[in-house]
Image (cartoon, grey):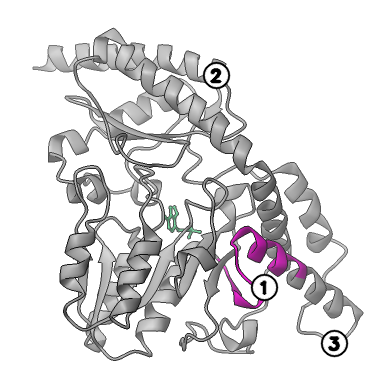
Amino acid sequence: MANVYFDNNATTALDSRVLESMLPWLSSQSGNPTSRHVYGRSARDAVEHARVQVAEACGAYSSQVVFTANGTEANNFAIKGMAGNLPSAQILTSAIEHPCVTRPALMMQQFGYSSKPIAVDSSGKLSLENLQQQLTLPTSLVSVMLANNETGVIQEVAIVAELARAVGAFIHTDAVQGLGKIPLSFTDLNVHAMTVSSHKIHGPQGAAALILDKRVDIQPLLHGGGQEKGLRSGTENVAAIVGFGVACELAVANRIHYASHTQLLRDQFEQGLVDIGSIKSSVMIFGNKVARLPNTSFFAMNGIEGETLVMALDRKGYAVASGSACSSDSTEPSNVLLAMGIDKDLARGAVRVSFDATNTPAQVNDFLVTLNNEVKRLKELTAIAA
Ligand code: PLP
C-alpha cells in the first residue's frame, strides 16, 4: 500500500533541520525568556533571533512580529483587537475566509459591530466592485486572505489595502497559506496586520505570528505578564518559536524551487485528472482560470461524494482532504465553493490535493491510477444502488 501525504495545506511534516534546532530548547536549555539569569537570557536571545528570521520571511521589521500560539489566535487577535479599539462600524471579511476570521468578526456583533461578507466571483476572486460598494458605509476593519486554503486562489490584497485605507479603514490579511509558497511582503501589501503560521511551512505546531504595524492601537487577547510588549502575555513557547524561525529561513531559501516543483506536480495531476477516461466528462477544477497557489488542486466529480472518495483513497494509503481540513468534521459542503456559486451537490464532491516539494512525479502517477480505479468502483457502486 502507498504511504503518501498530499494534504500539505492542512499541515506539513516537521523538517529535520527544524527539529534539530528545537531539540536543545526541549532538553538542556530550559530558561524562561523573562528571567534575568543566564538561562533566561539565552532563551530571550533565541526568541529574538527567531523574530528576525520570521520578519525577514515576511518582508517586515522584527519589531513588527508578535508571536502567538497558532494562526487561529493571530487572526482572532487581529479582528477582535483592532476592531475593539475602533468605532463600532462594520467589519468586512471576504466570503471565503477561514472560520478563524469570520467567527471573531461575527462575535464582534455583540459589541455593536456589524459583520458583512465581501462577494467573490465564480473563480473565487474577490469582487473589488462589491468591496468598493460596501466601503461607502462607515467601515472599521477589512480582512481579506492572501490565498485561499481550499482553492489556493490568490487575492489582490495590495489593492484591497489601498481601497480600505482610502476610507480610513484598517486592513488585515490572513497570509497563512501564502508564506513559503508565493512572494510575501508585509511592506508591499501595505496592510496593518498579517497572519502567518509555522506548521504550514514544515515548522512545528504551536507557533505563529501577527505581523503588526506599530502605529495600530490594538487590544491584547491575553492579559498577564506583559510578554510580547504587552500584546500577548504568556510564557513564550521557545522551542516552537525557534523552530518557526528556522522554518522561515528554509522556506525563503526554497521558495523558488518549491513553486516550480509543486506546480509541475499539480499540472501533471490535473492533466491526468481530465485524461482519466472514467471521469473525463464530469470533473471540475475550481479556481484554475486565475492566479492560485502552485501546490493546490481542488476538484469535484459529479455524482461522487468528496468524503467517500477521501476515505477510499485513505484506505489505499493516500492522504488528501475534502473541503477544508479545519472543518472536515462537518458534512456541509465547502462554504468557499458555495460563495463561488457552485451547486451544492457538486460542492459535496470537492476534494483537495495539496502537494509539497518532497512529493514526486512517480507518486502523482501512481495516485492517478488509484484515483481512476476508486472513482470507477464508486461509480459502479452508485449505479448498483440506483
Ligand atoms: N488561515 C488559513 C487560511 C488556514 O488555512 C489555517 C489553517 O488551516 C488557519 C488560518 C489557522 O491556522 P492554525 O492552524 O495555525 O491555527
In this picture, is 349 found above or below 191?
above
Mark 1 and ligand 1: say if the CB distance to the nearest ligand atom is below 8 Å. Answer: no
Q: In the rendered image, which residue does mark 2 sit on?
A: 361
Q: Is residue 271 visible?
A: yes
Mark 1 element type: helix
Q: CA distance from mark 1 to mark 2?
A: 38 Å
Look at label 3 and name its amino acid: Arg
Whether the magenta-drawn stretch holds residue 50 is answered as yes
- Residue 60 picture quarter: bottom right
Question: Could you say where residue 165 lies in the image, as x and y percent from the top left?
Answer: 35, 77
Q: CA distance from mark 3 to mark 2?
A: 52 Å
Residue under the image location 49 percent in, 31 percent down: 263
Question: Could you say where residue 381 lies in the image, as x and y percent from the top left?
Answer: 20, 14
Q: Which residues are magenta?
A: 49-69
Select label 1 or label 2 by which is in front: 1
Q: In the rendered image, which residue does mark 1 sit on?
A: 62
Q: Earlier in the sequence, mark 3 or mark 2?
A: 3
Mark 3 element type: loop
* Relative horizontal placement of residue 224, taking residue 349 as reference (left or right): right
Graded by Cα atoms within 10 Å as few (under 14), some (14 to 19) or many (20 or more), the crowding at tag 1 reads some
Look at label 2 and name its amino acid: Pro
Q: Is residue 31 visible?
A: no
In this picture, is 331 found above or below 382?
below
- Residue 35 picture quarter: bottom right
Question: Could you say where residue 343 lies in the image, as x and y percent from the top left?
Answer: 12, 39
In this picture, is 361 found above or below 251?
above
